[in-house]
Amino acid sequence: MTDDEYDAVVGILDRRPEDAELAMYSVMWSEHCSYKSSRAWLGRFRSDYPWVVIGPGENAGVVDLGDGWLAALRIESHNHPSFVEPYQGAATGVGGILRDIFTMGARPVAVWDPLRFGPLEDAHNRYLFDGVVSGIAGYGNAVGVPTLGGEIEFADRFSSNPLVNVMALGLMKEEQLVTRAAATVGHAAILLGSSTGRDGIGGASILASAAFDQTSTGKRPSVQVGDPFEEKKLIEACLELYDAGLVAAIQDLGAAGISCATAESAAAGGLGMDVDLDAVPLREAGMTAAEILMSESQERMLAIVDPGDVDAVFAIADKWDISASAIGTITEGGKLRVTHHGVEVASVPAGSLSEGAPRYERRRQRPDDLESIWADAPRLSGQIDLGATLHRLLDDPALGDRSSIYQQYDHMLFLQTIVEPGHDGSLIRIKGTEKGVAVSTDGDASRCFLDPRRGAERIVFESALNVAVTGARPYALVDNLNFGNPEKPEIMWQFVETVEGIAAACDALAVPVVGGNVSFYNETDGVDIYPTPVVGMLGFCDPMPAHPPRLDRAEAGMDVWLIGQEDGTDLAGSRVAGHHLGGRPAAIDFDVARRVVAHATRLADAAPVLHDVSAGGLMVAIAEICILSQVGVTLEECDAALMLDEAPSRLVAVTPVGFDLKIDDVPTRHLGVVGGDWIDQGPNHLMSVAEATAVWRDAIPRRMAP
Amino acid sequence: MTVAVIVFPGSNCEHDAVYALRALGAEAELVFHKETDLSGADGIILPGGFAHGDYLRTGAIARFSPIMAEVERHAAAGTPIVGICNGFQILTEAGLLPGAMVANRDLRFICRHVLVRVESTDSVLTSNAEVGQVLRIPLNSYEGNFVFGAAETAEGVVLRYVDDRGEPDDTINGSTVAGLASPAGNVVGVMPHPERATESILGSSDGRVLLEAFMTSVAAVPA
C-alpha cells in the first residue's frame, strides 16, 4: 500500500484503520483485485450487443445462445503463483476460474490453458512447464472438467515470469442464471466449502501485485493449495442449491478471500454485512482476524440465503459432505462490520473496498528504441533450402506436436467434444440441440512486443479464424492482459496500445468483449515480460456442420488452396526469423480479415480441411495437414518467402476435385494436390511425410526427456 | 427395466453413462451413494471419475459407501453390474473382482483411443461381441494398470489391449487387461470407457456392442 493509498483509507474512515481493516484495504486495493492501473482504459471495450446477457464486471461474461441456452465464459491468470510453485499455482488457477463460472449458475464444461515459458533448453523452464501441465491435469481431471486446448509459446523473457492463463466455459439454461447482487436485509451469509487456513495469505497482494527478485521462493507460503475433490463436491452442492432455488445470490472466494466476498456481496445491493469471524471454520489454531480476512484458502463460496432456507442449505451441504457455516447477516446502511472473539475488529463502508479503490492514469511513453527495432527487419537469405528450413521449424517446440501434453488432460468427458485438441479451434456440442460452441485462445508475445497495437489486432483476428474454421461465427471475447510493471511509462504505453488494438479488431468483427483479466507486475529483477495479451474467442453455430473440418481429413487427389492476401515480406516476429526479434509486423487490412473469417465459417459446411495459417507460415500449415492426414502433397513452385513469412488473415483449404470455393473478394491461389508419401515442391522432395511426422512428434518430448 | 448409475462424491462420468444408456433405449437413473435401497435396479453401473478424491487409494473409500452393501447383494444374486474406469477400481477394492489397479507405467494420465480385443463372450459386457473382435474405445485414466494378486489365478479377462497388429499390448499403461469378469460373468470391470464410444461423431461407435450386451443382460433379469 502506498502512503497516498493509506491516507485515502484514513480519509474514508475518518480515523486511522485497525489492523484487520488495513489488511482488508491492502488486499482489496492491490493491483490484482482493484485494477487500479488499468480500469481507466478498459471502458474502451464494447459489450452492448443484443446477445450479451452479462458484460464485464461480474464473475463471468454471459451470452445468449438461443432457445433458453446461455454460455458463461471467463479467462484468468495465475502467473506469479506458478513461478513460485508450478503445480499448485496452475492447479489453483483452474480451481479459481471454475468457481467464477459456477458462481453464475452454470456447470463448468471445459477449460483451455494458454501457457508461456522460457526456452526448454533450460532445466528450470522444463521444471516449470512440467509442473504447470501436471497441475492443470491433476486438478482438471480430478474435478471433472475437460481441458480441451490451449497454447504454448516460448521466449526468454518468460523464464522468470511464466504465464499461466486459464479460460473456462460454462453452460446453463436461462432460469439457472445467478448473480451477485445481495437480496434483502436479514439474509444470511453462509460460507461453504473448505476450512480457512494460512495458505495463500495475501496471495493477491503479495504475489500478483508485485514483481519478483532473488528472494521470491520465500513467497511459497503465499501460494494457495488446491483440493479438486472438495471443489467437485462444491460444484455439485451449489448446482443442487440453485436447482432448489435456495440461493438469493452467491459469490466465490478468490483473491482477497473473505474480505472480497463479504464486501462485494453487500455492496452489490448497496447494503452492508455483519460478519463474525468466530463462525469461520479454521484449519489452523490461533489465526488472527487479519489472517482470516486475507486467507486465500481455496474451494470456498459465500451464499446469500433467506433465513427460512438456511436449514435446507445445511441439509444439501451435509449430503455432499461439505462444510457450511453462517458467518454473517446482510444489514442496512452499507457498513461491513467484522467481529472476532466478541470484539469489533473492522467497520468500513462495504463499497469503499471495491468501488472506492484508487484509479490511476499512469504515465505512458512510447519506448525510445522502437523505431530502431522496426528498422532491424529480418530478411531471408538469398538461397533458402526449404526442406531444411521445414525440418528446423517442425522441430521447434513452439510449433511441434502437443499431444504429449493434451493426452494428460481428459478431453473426452461429457460426450461433447466434436473437435478435440490438436486442431485449430475446439468445437463442442450442446447435447439435445444442434448447437455448437467453438473456442480458441491466442496470444503472440513476439509480435506484441514489436508493435503492441498491431499484435493485439492480429491475435483477435487469428482467434476469430480459429473458431470460424469449425463452422462457428465469432460471438464473444474475453481478454487476459499480461504485462510488466505499470509504474514504467513504456509498459503503460504497451498496455493502452494493446487495449486499442483489441477494441478496434473486436469492433470490426462486431464481437463483444464480455470480460477479462489484467495481470501486471510480470517483472523479475527489473526485466519485464513482453506485452502479452491473450484472447479467448467464443464462436457459435446453430446448426453445427454435420462433418466439421479437421486437419486429418486430407486425401489423395484433393486440391490445396490458399485464401488470403499474400505478402512474402512479413517476417517480423516470425518463427523462421527465430531469435532475431526486429522489424515491424504488417498492418492488418480489417476488411480482408473479416472476409476471410466469413469465408471460413461458410466453407466449414463442406470443406474437409480448413487451417488457419499462423506461426511457421504456409509451409508449416501445409506440413501439419500432411502429418495429421498421413499423406503427402505436391506443391506448385513458388517463392520460398511466400511459404515462410507470416502474413496475417490467411486460410488453407483442402477440398475434393471440382469443389467451388465461390470466393471473389479475397485473393485465392491453388497451391497443389494431395497425394503420395512426400511433401514435394514441383519435382523436388522437401521432406517425406514419415520424417516430417517423426520430427514434429518428437519436438517437445525429446527436450523434456530426463 | 432400470439401470442404476451410482454417484459417489467425485464421480464425474455418471451423466455420460445415463446419456449413452438412454440413447440406446435403456431406462437409467442416478442413485446417490448414501442410498441403501437398490431393490428396483435390474442392472448397475459404477461410473468413472474420482470417487472420494482417490483418497488413500483409488476406490478404497467408495467401497465403504452405504450403497455398496446393496451392490454386493446384487452381485451375489447375478444382477448385471459393470464398473467403468473408477468403477472397475471400486469393484476390485470391494473384492467383487480380483486384482488391483496401480498407476500407469509412465506415471501420466492417458487420454486417447486404444484398441481392445474381445477375449471371451462369457460376460454381461461382451456377450453380444465375438471372440477376436477388435474395438476402438477411449482410455482416460491415471491408475489403469491392472494387476492380479500374487496368489490369484489370472482368469476372467474379457478384453485385452492390443496394438494395431492385434497383438496384446502392455505398453499403453503397463497391463494388457482392459476388462475383467467375475466367474459368473455378471460383474465386469472395464478400464476404457464404452459410454464414450457410442457415436461416430465422437470418434468411435465401437462401444455400442458392449453396452448393448449389458442391456440385453439387464432385460433378461426376471421381473
Image (cartoon, coloured by chain):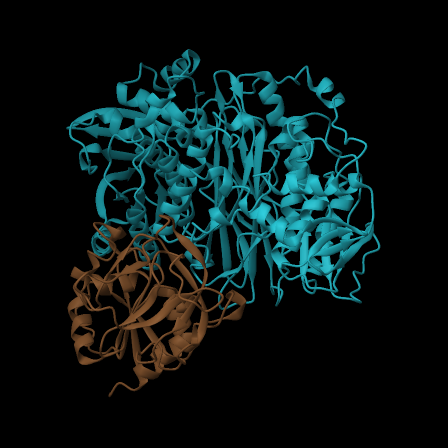
Q: Which of the image's four quarters has the N terminus of chain A?
A: top left
Rendered residue at 27%/19% (across/down) = A19
Indicate whether A563 appears above or below A6: below
Query: Percent from the top left, x then y, of residue A49?
Result: 61, 48
Quarter-wise, where is residue B17 in the image? bottom left
Q: Which of the image's four quarters has the C terminus of chain A?
A: top left
Is residue A181 something one can see in this rendering?
no
Query: Percent from the top left, x then y, of residue B14?
Result: 34, 64
Left or right for A682, reference A100: right
Query: Percent from the top left, x then y, of residue A616?
Result: 67, 41
Rendered residue at 74%/45% (across/down) = A593
In-front residue for pair A206/A355 = A206
Chain assigned brown: B
Query: Percent from the top left, x then y, of residue A317?
Result: 24, 52
Q: Name the residue furthest top.
A: A3
Indicate whether B29 appears above or below A379: below
Rendered residue at 21%/34% (across/down) = A276
Left or right for A88, reference A689: left
Q: Colour of chain A?
A: cyan
**What count of labels does the image hold?**
0
Quarter-wise, where is residue B149 in the image? bottom left
Is residue A142 something one can see in this rendering?
yes
Indicate whether A300 appears above or below A669: above
Quarter-wise, where is residue A95 in the image? top left
